[in-house]
Image: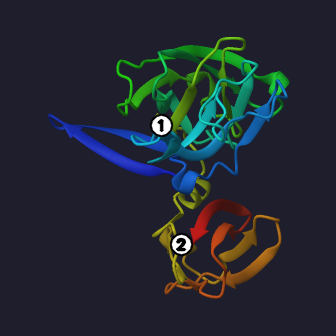
Amino acid sequence: MKKNLLLLVFIIFTGISSAQYTIWEDDFDDSDASDWTLLDRDGNGSNWIGRKNIQLDANTGAIVDGTIDVLGTYNIDLTNGGSSLPTTEDNLAVSPVIDVSFYSGKIALIINAQTSIYDSSQDLLIYGSTSPDPAAFTLLKTITIERNTIEDAEFKDYTIDISQYAGKPAVYIALGNKPNIPFIGYEINKISVSAEALLGVDDVALKASLCTLKQNPVNDYLQLEIAEEFQTEETKLTIYNTNGLIVKESSFKPEGLSVEDLSQGIYFLTVTNNGVSKKIKFLKK
């Protein structure tokens, strides 16, 4: 499930309260990476892709889907028994825009990842930028994704300090392999950005950022958790399809907005009030 929201989590130790804020996260639910920009920079037709992690069929030895939704890139032919590709990879996966304008202090990028089965430990290059232009990205860190077994799931969290982007309204993270280094596969199970503090911001804008969906995926009714002052007809809801076309518009209603007439798929909800806007991606089941 994709989230671009504020989740307030308070942890109390010995009477002292501290807070951690999840700014953005993506767990590639339903193997969906449609809001990422995936660049096959070597032009060999093999690229990052949203899919299930790879496994081997014990009876046939064929590559089959596992059970974990991932963003993956592979240097093998997934449709032809896993044979090696004739060239090594140079692929880049660029995240959707991440709004860090409300946050200060330590900003952490957390990547839950593994190298695929039958691979070895591999380096993953982590880039950052305030522009989606690939030429603008700078290398933040090289992390080594460890593999100690042949076939076990070995997803682990790897943390990168990206505090230099605190307070920025638009941040992009990119993932890349080392060019010309052979590998079998990288698999990202989840990626998130968290912060330890809030900037002193306008209360209206901050409360608007706390708007979230009560359920995602959504069945028949889309319901919002939103600050009380936004629970009025002045708050406008607009739903777009993936082609950018408006498919439904409504004022806020406490009982929720009926979406039972929408076909299954991915949509974008924009919540707007008094010039403050929040965009939320959701899946209609």
Residue 61 has which mark?
1
Residue 87 screen position, x and y as percent: 76, 19
Please tell me which of labels 2 and 1 falls first in the chain.
1
Secondary structure beneath dot 2 equals helix
Secondary structure beneath dot 1 equals loop
Q: Read off the residue under disc 2.
A: 229
Label 2 amino acid? Glu
Asked if residue 143 lies left or right of residue 261, the reply is left
Q: Residue furthest front?
A: 60
- What is the crowding at mark 1: few (fewer than 14 residues within 10 Å), some, or many (at least 20)? few
Observer-nearest residue: 101 or 153? 153
Observer-nearest residue: 43 or 275? 43
Tell me which corner region of the image, top left, top right, bottom left or bottom right, holds residue 163: top right
Residue at left offset 68%, top offset 36%:
48
Label 1 amino acid? Gly
Residue 45 screen position, x and y as percent: 80, 34
138 up-or-down from 230: above or below: above
Question: Would residue 190 be seen by someone viewing this image from the given angle?
Answer: no
Observer-nearest residue: 238 or 30? 30
Label total for image: 2
Observer-nearest residue: 12 or 69? 69
148 up-or-down from 252: above or below: above
Are dots 2 and 1 in contact, CB under 8 Å? no
Residue at left offset 51%, top offset 79%:
219
Q: Residue furthest left?
A: 14
Residue 255 screen position, x and y as percent: 49, 87
Residue at left offset 61%, top offset 83%:
259
Residue at left offset 60%, top offset 51%:
202
181 up-or-down from 177: above or below: above
Residue 83 screen position, x and y as percent: 63, 28
Asked if residue 196 lies left or right of residue 261, the reply is left
